[in-house]
Image (spheres, grey):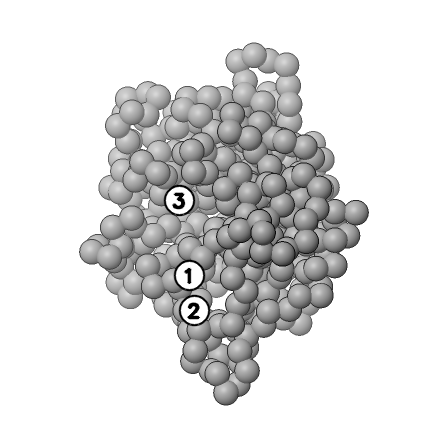
Amino acid sequence: MALAAVLGLASACSFGPPDPDQQGAPPNLPKPSTDASDGAPQQGEGSQEVAVTVLAKGLDVPWGMAFLPDGSALVTERDTARILKVGPGSDAEGLTVTEAQRLNEVQAAGDGGLLGVAVSPKYQTDKTIYVYYSTAKDNRVGKLVLGGRLTPILTGIPRSTEFNGGALAFGPDGLLYAGTGDGTPTGTQAQNPKSLGGKILRMTTAGKPAPGNPVKDSLVWSSGHHNVQGIAWDKTKRMYASESGQKKSGELNVIAKGKNYGWPKADGPGSDAKLTNPMFSWPVANSGCAGVATLEQTVATACLLGKRAYLLNVTGNGTVLGAPQEVLTGEYGRLRSMVAAPDGSLWVGTSNQEDEGDPAPDDDRIIRLVFSDGGAGRS
């Protein structure tokens, strides 16, 4: 019943771009709810209603998203190696989309290419952004000022046709985190402490091991990962990461310093006390989740194979309250990127222009989600 209500609202409420005579003005988008007494219909505990807006269309496998101080978003396209600027202006089609730069150093193939993007916490002064990208021989993290030269700060992350990872974000501590892929179907890198594959890495903006890492002079923050394509933190500074590409289970993990998340010894929950079980897991066919974002007590993840997003109500001690809520199931195809926007909404990118997708005429798209208050946190 809750899912029916969600989808009913999503289809009934359309908040599109402004009329043509308003072109150039900020888009006429719904404002996030800030008070449970605003008259929004209520559902059962842990369930939220969702209003959906298509912000941009005609993209080619958008992968990473990060916001600039002016409210615009930088969006990477995996296969074209373009960095796009989305907004803050708008026209009759939605938010304006312009090419900020194309990175010739990127060699896209399989699920490798131009992947994660992160904006420097000091962007107002240094104008620097960071990207996770593939070359012909490895995956790398690099930095650049838009329009300038791409400089690699970390090389040698295992490269393969699949399982290249790609998550990239600055944590609350101001340090740069990268989620890598194991690079092999059997998991030979994930348990090897000397390999950068199958890990979450924590580094300085120069690409060096960060102070306080589990092992001095090592970049590794956590290990035993198969393919990390999304990382995020909540307001308590608790870190979350997605896990995809395993044989049986898709996972959402709470990430802690020095923990081992099991791959390939464990696929989903296990009984080995030395390994850390996922916070939640789903069958592969219903998940294959990538992007992760948080809003108050809600942790959300966008899924490729499952063609849906999950909303999890997470308590103060980090446990999931009730069953995850499913939204957008089958409505927009494969969902990959997800990020919390400065205005308290979620932006989600589709991934239908790749080989596994079935693109609609407007694909790929960026979708904006606004939640009503429903007990699981509100935007």
Position of residue 233 measured from the top left corner of the image (x, y, whole percent)? 44, 38
At a point 42% along the width and 61% down the height, the residue shown is: 73
Q: Is residue 306 at all visible to an observer of this figure?
A: no
User: Crowding at label 1, few (<14), some or many (≥20) Cα neighbours within 10 Å?
Assistant: many
Task: Name the residue carrying label 1.
Answer: 73
Q: Amino acid at mark 3?
A: Ala
Q: Disc 1 versus disc 3: distance between alpha carbons? A: 14 Å
Q: Tell me the kind of residue under disc 1.
A: Ala
The answer to whether residue 291 is above or below residue 279 is: below
Image coords of residue 209 (percent x, y) = 29, 31
Residue 169's disc number: 3
Residue lying at the far right of the rendered structure:
1
Nearest to viewer (mark 2 / mark 3): 2
Amino acid at dot 2: Gly
* Side (left or right) of 331 relative to 199: right
Q: Is residue 82 visible?
A: yes
Q: What secondary structure is found at the residue carrying circle 3? A: strand
Examine the image and state in which quarter residue 99 appears: bottom left
For the residue pair 168 and 125, the one nearer the viewer reads as 125
Closer to us: 38 or 26 = 38
In the rendered structure, are the residues bearing label 1 and label 2 in contact, judged by CB atoms less than 8 Å apart? yes
Residue bearing the label numbered 2? 87
